[in-house]
Structures are given as structure tokens and as C-alpha cells.
Image: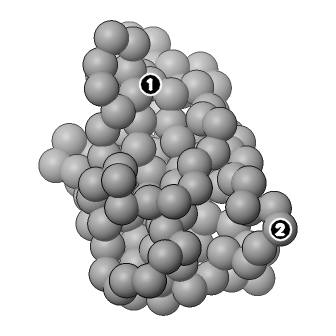
């Protein structure tokens, strides 16, 4: 499975961006999915996750209330809507999917099986 992210860019603090993640070679529905990010000099960190049927989501405390993870099965695409962006949100954002068995939402990077190449988000203050 190859995941392709898009939607990153440069935005002013307080602005919004929507990241997209689409797979090639497989449909996306019925797989738990997550978004992680990595800022320069820092480790990759969990951002948001959604369970296989889209009915349950979970967010890192730093983004809760500002970011929304969702999916559109008709378009075979997952999204991360980011609002009220802050300079500390600047990072490379990665989408990831879990194809092995297991239900629920997953916050550990090791819980996932495939990763996208990442998309840069830069928030200017």
C-alpha cells in the first residue's frame, strides 16, 4: 500500500489547512488510520487517529479542539482539517494506516503498517 499526502503548505498563524491522504492499490475503508508529525530536531509524535469505521476518533492534547480527522469512503481519502494553527504546529505531517487485525484507535507509531512520504506544514507567526 502506498499512501500519498497532499495539502501542506505555508500558512499564517490562526489560519487553516486541510491535509489529504489517499492510498494506491487498496481501498481505505475499514482500516484504522492516523496522522503523526515530526518537527525539526524532534521525534515523530502522534496527532490524531480514527478507527476502522470512522465512528471513533482520538487527538493529542496539543491539537484537540483545533484539528479534525475524518474520512470520505466515496473518495477513498482521509483528511486532517487543521484550524487555529500555531507556529508550534510546524512540522512534516505523515498519514499512516494499520492493515493488520485490531479494532479501536491507535496512538503508537508501531501500531501502524504503512506510511506516506509526508507533507510539510509551515505556520508563520
User: Which quadrant: the C terminus?
Assistant: top left
> Residue 72 vs residue 97: left or right?
right
Report x, y in % for residue 98.
49, 68
Q: Is mark 1 on a helix, strand or loop?
A: strand
Residue 25 disc label: 2
Q: Is residue 44 above or below residue 71?
A: above
Can residue 65 be seen here? The reply is: no
- Determine which residue is flagged by label 1: 91
Query: Is 50 or 108 nearer to us in this picture?
Result: 108
Query: Is 93 or 100 nearer to us in this picture?
Result: 100
> Do residues under tags 1 and 2 come within 8 Å of each other at their CB atoms?
no
In percent of the image, x 74 and y 78: which residue is there? 27
Q: Total label count?
A: 2
Q: In this view, does 44 lie above or below 53?
A: above
Q: In this view, does 17 lie above or below 125?
A: below
Report x, y in % for residue 121.
53, 27
Q: What element carries label 2?
A: loop
In percent of the image, x 35 and y 85: which residue is there? 103
In percent of the image, x 45 and y 13: which residue is there? 124
How many residues crowd around disc 2 within 10 Å: few (fewer than 14), some, or many (20 or more)?
few
Mark 1 or mark 2, earlier in chain: 2
Query: Is 80 or 114 nearer to us in this picture?
Result: 114
Name the residue furthest left.
Answer: 61
Measured in 3D between alpha carbons, the distance from the residue under mark 1 to the one under mark 2, in whole angstroms, is: 27 Å
Report x, y in % for residue 93.
50, 36
Q: In this view, does 96 lie above or below 122?
A: below
Can residue 31 be seen here? The reply is: yes
In percent of the image, x 62 and y 82: which residue is there? 29
> Residue 22 vs residue 94: left or right?
right
User: Which quadrant: the N terminus?
Assistant: bottom right
The nearer-to-camera label among 1 and 2 is 2
Amino acid at each position: 500500500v502506498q499512501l500519498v499526502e497532499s495539502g501542506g503548505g505555508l500558512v499564517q498563524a490562526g489560519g487553516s489547512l486541510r491535509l489529504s491522504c489517499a492510498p494506491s492499490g487498496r481501498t481505505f475503508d475499514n482500516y484504522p488510520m492516523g496522522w503523526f508529525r515530526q518537527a525539526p530536531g524532534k521525534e515523530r509524535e502522534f496527532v490524531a487517529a480514527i478507527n476502522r469505521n470512522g465512528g471513533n476518533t482520538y487527538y493529542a492534547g496539543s491539537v484537540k479542539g483545533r484539528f479534525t480527522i475524518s474520512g470520505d469512503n466515496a473518495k477513498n481519502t482521509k483528511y486532517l482539517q487543521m484550524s487555529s494553527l500555531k507556529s508550534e504546529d510546524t512540522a512534516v505531517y505523515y498519514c499512516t494506516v494499520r492493515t493488520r487485525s485490531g479494532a479501536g484507535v491507535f496512538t503508537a507509531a508501531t501500531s501502524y503498517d504503512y506510511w506516506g512520504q509526508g507533507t510539510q506544514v509551515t505556520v508563520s507567526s
